[in-house]
Image (cartoon, grey):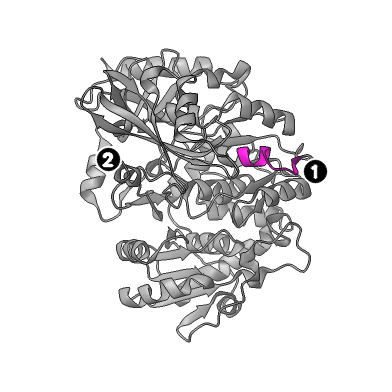
Amino acid sequence: MNEQAYLDNLRQLWAKNWPAGTPTTPQYPKGEKPLSEYLRAWAQEAPSRPAIHFYGYDLSYAELDKLSNQFANLLRNLGIQPGDGVAVFMPNCPQLHIAYFGIMKCGAIYVPVSPLSKEMELRYQLGDSKPKVVLCFDGLLSIVHPVCKDLGIKHVMATSYSELTPENPTIPLPDLFHAPKVELKEDILDLYRALASVSDEPLDYVPALDDVFALNYTGGTTGLPKGCEHTHRNIIGTAAAFSPVVFGNYSGEASNSIMLNFLPEFWIAGENAGMLFPMFAGNTLVLLARWDAVSFLEAVQYYKVNSCVMLVDSIDEVLNTPTLNDYDLSSIDTTPCISFIKKLNKDYRNRWRKLTGSTIFEAAFGMTETHTCDTFTKGLQDNDFDLSFDPVFVGLPVPGTEFKICDFTTGELKPLGDEGEILIRTATALKGYFNNPKASADLFAEGGWIRTGDLGMVTKEGFIRYMGRRKEMLKVNGMSVFPTEIEAIIGQHPSVASCGVIGRSDEKKGQVPVAFITLKPGYEETEESLRSWCKNAMAVFKVPEIKLMAQMPMTATGKIRKVELEKAL
């Protein structure tokens, strides 16, 4: 099959099915330049506009610009030069945004680290990335400080939630605010005291678009995480390709739209939702330290939030909040969602539409290596068209991105409608894996294509379907069974909190699906009753064995660690 003819045909199909009024090329309202230059522009054009609302603590665009200038100058004073690493080990807070844009302005490399990391995980990531500075939440110093000493990391900074406690909170404060500020040792810098001692004048420096900005580590569901080298071009390219088609804000003028983010911002999807997309459009961000259904409801009502990237699990929790009817969520007009444990279905959509007047839709297919936003489904919801495919329908490629499906072994193109490996070509693809040339070489195929290792299909109409990791697909009596499909069906049971499906070997059937399930509080389903329910919900060869668990093993980004489930077989 000729690749050029294959892609020409796909481009025609994509154009035919493209939602009306949706941009077909990446949009750069302030030009193709580092995102920190967008911050400078908004600070000049709309200096008093709120950039961040954080439980009643607010930062305007002008304030965020000045504080990030100060952080950039502080790093320079510590000897940090372009290309040096700066690790950030903290939960969602305005200080993380200050650091993010300060690191960007001085040309250093941002290394986000999960605040849930334990000592061994922390030691691995800091040892691999070799940052020269670590900024952390002061409550995490007992973990990070000894590791930094052992690794020879000279500069450690700390900050606290207590420094941001508002006199009149707008929404309920999480317990992190009530922890007293930790007394710092002499070799640890207090972030705000250090910032007060440096200039807020901008550095005479703008990083090049192809300079590496971030080391985003892969989720580590299998093997050790790898650091994905993302450039400034990747960062702004992600926003330019995805934000206009999903949120519609790309006029080049500061927007009145209010976005909310609760996704953890050390995670690349949270980085996109909390730092890239609001800054790209000049929006105001309502930032939550972490997910809490009541805080979400309070924030939407108080700030009149217009959009938020949700997890389907979070939507489920909101819809089942006992006090839901006490809140007005009618301001919400855009709700992309991510199907991790629970999957989007018509029931969730109908209930959300009744509650808010807006339609929830699957956000995107993507991977850390491509900055996660490679497809979109917005505009494909007429008559629930997007939900008529099983398993997950992920729509069309975002502007500037291409897909093809190939044979896993030979690399040959597969006809439309056939299953195979998903390959992606996009301007947001990583430069390579940090300090890992072999893994980088294995990732890329000829022509700049990225091998995802994911099983999928491009339908005869040109739409993309994601079927899961190749190694997760099961063969039951010769029939293909996709764990994602079983998880989606079981997730509709009212008692199920989480579900992860893997396969076990079977002499007669080849493989048998096994569903590990946790229950919501107050439910008393048994393995037998759940299996009986499954027999009425899916084809007999898909019906899994059921194993109830008290707690599901999870990664820091909310993915089920199926490697751990395999140990429980």
* Depicted 93 relative to depicted 388: above or below: below
Q: Residue 443, which numbered label?
A: 2
Quadrant (top left/top right/bottom left/bottom right) for the C terminus = top left
Q: Main secondary structure of the magenta part?
A: helix
Q: Is residue 417 left or right of residue 318?
A: left
Give the quadrant of residue 370.
top left
Neighbour class for label 2 at 10 Å: few (<14), some, many (≥20)?
some
Give how far across and how far down residue 257 sits, in percent: 71, 43
- Which label was assigned to residue 268? none
Viewer can see residue 24: yes
The quarter of the picture where the N terminus appears is: top left
Q: Is residue 449 magenta?
A: no
Vertical position of residue 476 compared to residue 155: above or below: above
| Camera-side mark, 2 or 1 | 1
Could you say which is closer to the camera, residue 289 or residue 437?
289
Q: Is residue 181 left or right of residue 445?
A: right
Give, as a three-letter code, the residue at label 1: Asp
Q: Which disc is residue 326 wearing?
A: 1
Magenta span: 315-324
Q: CA distance from mark 2 to mark 1?
A: 50 Å
Indicate the secondary structure of the residue bearing disc 2: helix
The secondary element bearing badge 1 is classed as helix
Assess disc 1: are there few (<14), some (14-19) or many (≥20) residues with their C-alpha within 10 Å of its C-alpha. few
Q: Judge from the rendering whether residue 111 lies leftward or rightward of residue 3; answer left or right.
A: right
The kind of residue on which mark 2 rests is Leu
Q: Provide residue 423's location: percent of width, then percent of height.
A: 33, 30
- Identified at 71% across, 53% down, the residue is 46
